[in-house]
Image: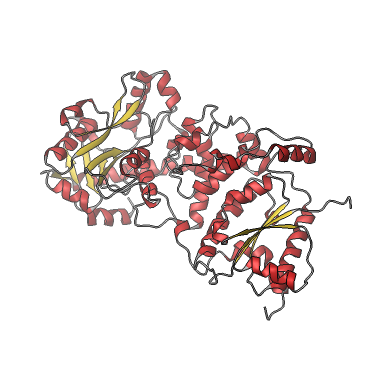
Amino acid sequence: MISGEEERMDAAGIPYMIRPGKGPEGSVLDLLGQLIGSGGADALLLPFRVPSGDSFAWIMFSDVSLLKDAVPFPATMPVQGGRALRSLTRKEKGKLRIIALMRPCEIRAGMELSKLGQVNTENLILASYDCPGAVKLEDYVADPVSCDSAHSEMRSRGEPSGNARSACSTCVDFSMVDADIHFGYFGIKDGGMLVLPGSPAGRALLEGLNLEEGRGLLPQWEAEISRLAERRAATREETFRETAERISGFDGMLATFSNCIGCHNCQSACPICYCRLCYFDSEVSRTDPEALITAAEKRGGISIPPDRIMFHTGRLAHMSLSCVSCGQCSDACPVSIPVADVFSFVAERTQRAFDYKSGRSDGEALPLRRFLKNELDGVHEMVKDAESEASPNE
Amino acid sequence: MSEWQPRILAILCNWCSYAGADLAGVSRIQYPPNIRVVRVPCSGRVDPLFILKSLQAGFDGVLVSGCHPGDCHYISGNYVARRRFAILKPLLEFVGIEPDRVQFSWISAGEGERFATVVTKVVEDVRKLGPSKRIVKKA
């Protein structure tokens, strides 16, 4: 793995291991139970299967006897964990010290929300795990049983399969992120698992548990993670290339979003879109009927309502800097528009422009919250010619 | 006058560019009458959606102008605006809006003449491109 990662790991503390036996799922639940028992935290936030059996819900609880019903690695992502963190801490740091076990993209969303003042991480212990990807909600609701087995197969291979979200196949941040604790199990034989502290808080918690030192497992895990990351990076490049082709130019954009029914589900499901009143849901966003008629006369015809492309372009302009490419938007789309592919593609470019990567720890300010005095001369270069023509004494 | 005239929305910051426009008027400097001015407190107030919406509403071009870097009345509003536009600009090009339709510039309160030059340049650029047909839908 990259050396920077190792340094960070060393700074946070030594890796621990859990011997094979219960498998990753059982080991994670055991360890979380111990953390609650040792008084390291007050409550847990984990996914549980809903009574109908075809989805999962976030449950916050402190009664460890409930742990046996939790599903630490759910096959789908019905509610993005970043949203769950936000509902708990959007006003101030939580009264309880909560350990939340989430996918890496959910923790990255939490980090972005924390930079946006929507999540307070002070009393949260975030735990991540090696994520093979999430199954599409649509598929899961149709057939939970076979999707569960498909997902467990994905976990053992470490790779997304056919019914995983497209965003997962192109995800390269599927393992250790800026969480307090990370559970690594990809590539470790016989169901053993690494427990990696990622922050001083995580280290303090784990130190109290008498875990076995796990440096020995590190090389095989790191090798597997970089192998998988390479494969996903290749898929990512390929998908981006296709997306670029598909949406390039106005006609491409129109073709991609032409079957949009304007439900704004992508916006409601997005973990980062947090405004209480979105411009696109407000009265001012509605075009005046008179103006529609004028436009129709001028252009010979218009589509009604007129805001489809504008809605998606506007959301790209607002949100792409914080997009964590979790794929919620595509999953929420009732007409199967590849919203997430477009967002990931644009997000990579806008974030690269500011040398920013969404979802890293909340010490780093958002690109629009900071600036350099001398940068981006190109922005106004269009009128530079005019400037040089203006008289010099101005 | 039946010949097509471009309509351009000029979003100007209160402290520099709007005053620059004012100076151009007071000094009786001539510039094309194709712009409609909206005054905002700061170029940092300009949401990318304002620009998209004006194009959608039928403007053929948009000019956003604020204080020179370092001169912002609110210290850093225009630096933030510059970052925001840096994202918007490639995005607009990407969805197929000609880059010359949306332009950004810095004009101070003392630069009446420059205001006229910039407006003339923008109007000419947009005139060359012709009427905006995009964003709403191709006719």
Image-quadrant location for residue A98: top left
Instruction: Specify the color scheme.
Output: secondary structure
| Residue A385 in view in this figure | no
**Which quadrant holds the C terminus of chain A?**
bottom right
Rendered residue at 39%/30% (across/down): A78
Left-right relation of A161 to A376 = left
Question: Outermost residue toward the bottom?
Answer: A393
A160 relative to B60, above or below: above
Left-right relation of A335 to A203 = right
Judging depth in this view, the residue of B98 and B54 nearest the camera is: B54
Rendered residue at 59%/48% (across/down): B49
Image-quadrant location for residue A269: top left
Q: Position of residue A331 (x, y in %)?
A: 46, 31
Q: Position of residue B135 (x, y in %)?
A: 68, 43
Q: Position of residue A85 (x, y in %)?
A: 33, 41
Left-right relation of B91 to A211 = right
B18 relative to A29, above or below: below
Rendered residue at 15%/38% (across/down): A36
Q: Position of residue A248 (x, y in %)?
A: 63, 43
